[in-house]
Amino acid sequence: MKYSSDLVVGWCPGALKPFESGDGLIVRVRLHLGRLSLVQLETLVNAAERFGDGNLYLSNRANVQLRGVTGEKHQALLEVLASAGLVDDDPRVEAIRNIQVSPAVELGVHARLAAGLVAKLEAALAGLEALYELPGKFGVAVQAGNEIDTGVTSDVTFLVQDERIATVLEGALDKAIVSGNTNAAAKGFASIAMAFLRLRRANPAIRRMRDAVALLGVEGVAREAGFEAAAHGLRVAEAPAPVGDLGGAYGIGFAFGEIARDALQELTAVMRREGIAEAGVSPHRAFVFPALGPEKAALAELAKRLGAIADPGDIRLRLHRCPGQPACRRGTVESKRHAEAVLGALAGTAFKGKIHISACEKLCAYQHETDITAIAKDGFYTVTAPGTKVAKAVSGADLPAVIAELARSA
Ligand code: SF4
């Protein structure tokens, strides 16, 4: 099932402009450079305790969310976040600073160049007022290494290598605009984003980059921006989630991105004890810590103790769900509870695909294709699976059995 840009509703919430949900305000903190210092993480943990429900939530766009914040506490929360450099000065900048960075601390020079590019992209988004018109859901992904990871692409995705930065557009990952350095790539981004805005103004059916690419082809969009897109010859494939031992780093994922208050206390305590100064935040809803031998051992032990995810094959990394009722008023089912039951039903199966359980058609939890998709409307799910299999009017109680059966025959 493809994410549909026809179903965009409302805006993408931030910290300055939060979203009212069924359990209070969702305050989404968009990180700078895709990472958190230990002090910033501790600030978020304390803020969640004082102003939210005590937990933190990692999003599939590599943001960190607080939930359950009341309107009266919002201003005080912002002051705490601002003291740690976790909010923008201008809500217009915050609204469009959607840059997800694939943590790549183990990749040395690639990672340093990627960090430099992210800083330049942030500056371009903040400094060019014309870009404030970008839709709130328009996103940028920055990856480093030798292949494009299809699991974490966005409207515009950069792959940073030593002397070569490939810019690919959603909907045509096989072709790229190639730049020789981070300055050129960041300038190129501004041209591409401006071209997208012009195309969108001319045709309101264009909501996201994939719509423009579908209508004009990647060559047409690139030409509008003053570039040429050509076959890049890079491998395009989904990479394993960055959890477990990553060489010079260690990743820990959290089921559905939820990190409970006790786990947060343990996590920050281990970071402080081991001298781990920061964590990258992955769109896979995982923290990636720079770590060598002793730190890795401590983090592995922590992941085990918390029941967190340190195996890239863990089904919890491939099952996506939104909170649903009662946390989200748009939802008509308790997708959180149903997803837990689905996890139980899948135990022991050899299913290697991805599943998305969504409490409404907005599909917030995951923006990429999945093998099995369950979308609720009026209290019942429609479940689609490989081939043309469709199960309609599936109740929450029946969902685990229906999905398990589809998974077995996939
Ligand atoms: S997909 Fe889920 S979280 Fe998103 S609006 Fe619908 S019910 Fe709410």
Image (cartoon, rainbow, N blue to C red):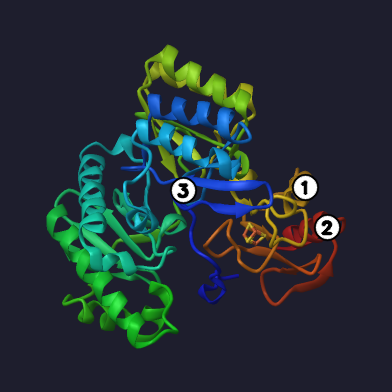
Q: Residue furthest top?
A: 273
Hey, which quadrant is residue 216 in on the image? bottom left
- Distance of mark 3 from mark 2, alpha carbons? 27 Å
Badge 2 element? loop
Which disc, if any, is residue 337? 1
Report the front residue among 73 and 248: 73
Report the front residue among 176 and 361: 361
* Residue at 46 percent of width and 51 percent of height: 14
* Classed neighbour count for the residue bearing mark 3: other residues with Cα under 10 Å, few (<14), some (14–19), many (≥20): many
Whichever of callouts 3 and 2 sits on the residue coming sooner in the sequence is: 3
Report the front residue among 139 and 136: 136
Whichever of callouts 1 and 2 sits on the residue coming sooner in the sequence is: 1
Percent from the top left, x then y, of residue 116? Answer: 20, 45
Identify residue type, mark 2. Answer: Gly
Which disc, if any, is residue 396? 2
Residue 222 position (above or below residue 177): below
* Residue at 48 percent of width and 17 percent of height: 270
Does 393 sit left or right of 272 as displayed? right
* Residue at 85 percent of width and 62 percent of height: 395
Badge 1 element? helix
Does 314 sit left or right of 121 as displayed? right
Percent from the top left, x then y, of residue 350? Answer: 69, 49
Identify residue type, mark 3. Answer: Pro
Q: How many marks?
A: 3
Does 381 sit left or right of 277 as displayed? right
Which disc, if any, is residue 283? 3
Contact flag, marks 3 and 2 (Cβ < 8 Å): no
